[in-house]
Image (cartoon, rainbow, N blue to C red):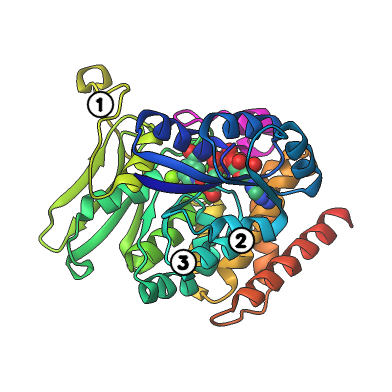
């Protein structure tokens, strides 16, 4: 029996994680946390019987306690609650399916008490990778990638030493606006940006895919997970999303992982690694597919990717600014307060104004986030 805790259980990755649990009776959910979806959380508690659950707001936690008066479960709230769930003694694996930098402190807390991490929450690694990777090594804790590209790289590496890698080929669908010029992106609406061609995901990452910031974050994520510098990570646009990423070795051999776009495979792989379990669902039919194609990313129409390269090369706290500015700008875009192109513009403005801190501590990372939020709000409301 493998006991798991899930941060962000009501979201896209969270609910698919619970689908895996449903199909595998040797997985047991002991702890769940979510933001504010009380109704969904109530249903999850009644189905999966965790011992502890957390809601971000105390108000939501109160309502959940009322609804679950007949159930023996502890309901906690806020950051304290997230931390309690992250270190919950009965769990062995923490699935970080929460969205945003809010995941930093719980992820670090879980590593410190020796939990394995199934990591979907890329924003945490992007901003605090320099702290998390050495900490995980120190505690002998595996960080198992859930992001489909990183799972594909992990599967393609299959234990080969990182010294034998010549390049990582990180595939990208190109999102809903692939092929458009910058001018054509000027007036795109929120509804258009939310229509991803191949994947159904949470709103924030769907917008990140439309701006290509998601691929920028994934280059950073790959750098930390696999210890490969940016110059050896190449983004390859592959609109069919069948090749989930590839590794090229020093002898020129390229190993790839292919499959239909379904996040349940990487989630399940992370939960059972090194075992492979059966997974129901569609399979790739190469005859139906006919062809797969490749393109260079368009850095002019999608400056979010070029800015990510700049942030990685400068290092220190600049990736935090890149990520925090994006989180704030995407929230403003979803609220209809800024246009699509302004997302990358705001990231750039924040990066230009920031004084880079080398090796920032958790406190400094969170201060940089607060500075960035304030700066962007000022910029938008002036
Ligand atoms: P989502 O918006 O669908 O779900 C986010 C979850 O986090 C929800 O359960 C929400 O309630 C919870 N949450 C948000 N704020 C919280 C807070 N303050 N406290 C507690 N819980 C909180 O997001 P998603 O698409 O599932 O993405 C989750 C993470 O996985 C992101 O980092 C994303 O980049 C990454 N990821 C997602 C996919 C995907 O297919 N959805 C693929 C790869 C990586
Ligand atoms: Mg991905």
**What is the x, y in percent for residue 309?**
48, 63
Horizontal side of 321 relative to 276 (left or right) equals right
Q: Residue 136: percent from the left, percent from the top?
A: 40, 70
Q: Does the residue labelled 1 lie within 8 Å of ligand 2?
A: no
Residue that badge 2 annotates: 83
Residue marked by disc 3: 111
Q: Which residue is drawn at 73% across and 35% down?
A: 69
| Residue that badge 1 annotates | 291
In the image, farthest residue toward the right: 382
Marks 1 & 3, CB-CB < 8 Å contact: no
Query: Which tag is nearer the camera, tag 1 or tag 3?
Result: 3
Q: Earlier in the sequence, mark 1 or mark 2?
A: 2
Task: Decide which of 151, 136 is in the foreground and name it.
Answer: 136
State the SS at label 2: helix
Dividing the picture into quadrants, the one containing residue 285 is top left
Magenta-colored span: 184-206
Assign ligand 1 to one image quadrant: top right
């Amino acid at each position: 029996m493998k006991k798991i805790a899930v941060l962000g259980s009501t979201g896209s990755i969270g609910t698919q994680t619970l689908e895996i649990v449903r199909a595998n009776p040797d997985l047991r959910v002991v702890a769940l946390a979510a933001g504010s979806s009380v109704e969904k959380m109530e249903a999850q508690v009644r189905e999966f019987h965790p011992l502890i659950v957390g809601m971000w707001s105390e108000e939501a936690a109160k309502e959940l306690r009322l609804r679950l008066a007949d159930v023996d479960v502890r309901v906690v709230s806020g950051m304290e609650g997230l931390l309690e769930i992250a270190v919950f003694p009965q769990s062995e694996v923490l699935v970080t399916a929460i969205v945003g930098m809010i995941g930093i402190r719980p992820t670090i807390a879980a590593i410190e008490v020796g939990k394995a991490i199934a990591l979907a929450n890329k924003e945490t690694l992007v901003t605090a990778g320099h702290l998390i990777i050495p900490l995980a090594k120190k505690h002998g804790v595996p960080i198992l990638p859930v992001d489909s590209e990183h799972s594909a790289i992990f599967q393609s590496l299959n234990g080969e030493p990182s010294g034998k890698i010549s390049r990582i080929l990180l595939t990208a669908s190109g999102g809903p606006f692939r092929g458009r010029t910058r001018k054509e992106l000027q007036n795109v609406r929120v509804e258009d940006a939310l229509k991803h061609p191949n994947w159904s995901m949470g709103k924030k990452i769907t917008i990140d895919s439309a701006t290509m910031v998601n691929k920028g974050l994934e280059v950073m994520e790959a750098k930390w997970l696999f210890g490969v510098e940016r110059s050896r990570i190449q983004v390859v646009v592959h609109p069919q999303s069948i090749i989930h990423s590839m590794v090229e070795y020093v002898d020129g051999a390229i190993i790839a992982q292919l499959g239909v776009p379904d996040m349940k495979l990487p989630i399940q792989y992370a939960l059972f690694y090194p075992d492979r379990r059966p997974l129901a669902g569609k399979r790739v039919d190469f005859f139906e597919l006919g062809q797969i194609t490749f393109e260079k990313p368009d850095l002019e129409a999608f400056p979010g990717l070029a800015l990510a390269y700049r942030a990685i090369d400068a290092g220190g706290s600049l990736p935090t600014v890149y990520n925090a500015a994006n989180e704030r700008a995407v929230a403003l875009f979803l609220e209809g307060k800024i246009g699509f192109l302004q997302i990358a513009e705001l990231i750039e403005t924040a990066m230009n104004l920031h004084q880079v801190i080398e090796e920032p501590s958790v406190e400094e990372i969170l201060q940089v986030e607060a500075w960035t939020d304030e700066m962007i709000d000022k910029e938008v409301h002036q």
